């Protein structure tokens, strides 16, 4: 599904309630923009973020399917990375930066063409 760009998706609880009520959506077809998408699973409910964003109002699909069928390009605007409780973000961020610089072929003498935000720092500042 990932390599072939198959039109399959996972949906969040809010999407399920809006379109299917209490029913089981697995196997149903929904349209995302003009693309048909077969629901293959339901995500665990997460609720709202500290910023008031509904984390259950989401449709996830394989990246290749999104790029080919919806975006029409291979650009990636955002990547969200989570660390387990044993890995401090201060240790993780330089590794993510190295991976992105390598993937984008940025030479050592050039500045990053991306930005990285540590959400724990933002959450601490808000608290």
Image (spheres, rainbow, N blue to C red):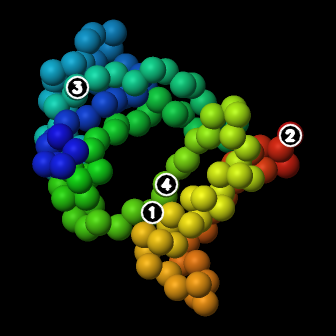
Extreme residue toward the bottom, this view: 109
Identify residue for label 3. 40
Identify residue for label 4. 79
**Which numbered disc, 2 or 4, marks the residue closer to the eye?**
4
Task: Work out whether mark 1 precedes mark 3 in sequence or the reverse, and give the earlier one.
Answer: 3
Name the residue rendered at 54%, 25% in the picture: 46
Q: Quadrant of the N terminus?
A: top left
Q: In the displayed structure, does residue 7 sit left or right of residue 9?
A: left
Name the residue rendered at 49%, 54% in the picture: 79
Hey, which quadrant is residue 43 in on the image?
Answer: top left
Marks 2/4: CA–CA distance? 24 Å
Hey, which quadrant is residue 24 in on the image?
Answer: top left
Q: Compared with residue 100, is residue 14 higher up or lower down, i.e. above or below?
A: above
Marks 1/2: CA–CA distance? 28 Å
**Which numbered disc, 1 or 4, marks the residue closer to the eye?**
4
Hey, which quadrant is residue 109 in on the image?
Answer: bottom right
- Helix, strand or loop at mark 1: loop
- Helix, strand or loop at mark 2: loop
Q: In the displayed structure, does residue 19 sit left or right of residue 99?
A: left
Q: Compared with residue 45, is residue 10 higher up or lower down, i.e. above or below?
A: below
Label number found at residue 127 = 2
Marks 1/4: CA–CA distance? 7 Å
* Residue 69 at x, y percent in the picture: 18, 55
* Residue 35 at x, y percent in the picture: 16, 47
In front: 45, or 16?
A: 45
Label number found at residue 77 = 1
In front: 90, or 73?
A: 90
Task: Work out whether mark 3 precedes mark 4 in sequence or the reverse, and give the earlier one.
Answer: 3
Q: In the displayed structure, does residue 17 sit left or right of residue 89?
A: left
């Amino acid at each position: 599904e990932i390599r072939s760009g198959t039109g399959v998706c996972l949906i969040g609880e809010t999407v399920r309630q809006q379109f299917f009520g209490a029913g089981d959506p697995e196997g149903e077809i929904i349209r995302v923009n003009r693309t048909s998408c077969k629901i293959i699973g339901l995500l665990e409910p997460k609720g709202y973020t500290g910023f008031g964003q509904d984390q259950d109002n989401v449709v996830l699909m394989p990246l290749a399917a999104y790029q080919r069928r919806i975006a029409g390009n291979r650009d990636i605007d955002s990547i969200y990375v989570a660390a387990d409780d044993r890995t401090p973000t201060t240790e993780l961020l330089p590794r993510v930066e190295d991976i992105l610089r390598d993937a984008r072929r940025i030479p050592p003498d050039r500045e990053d063409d991306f930005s990285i935000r540590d959400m724990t720092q933002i959450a601490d500042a808000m608290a």
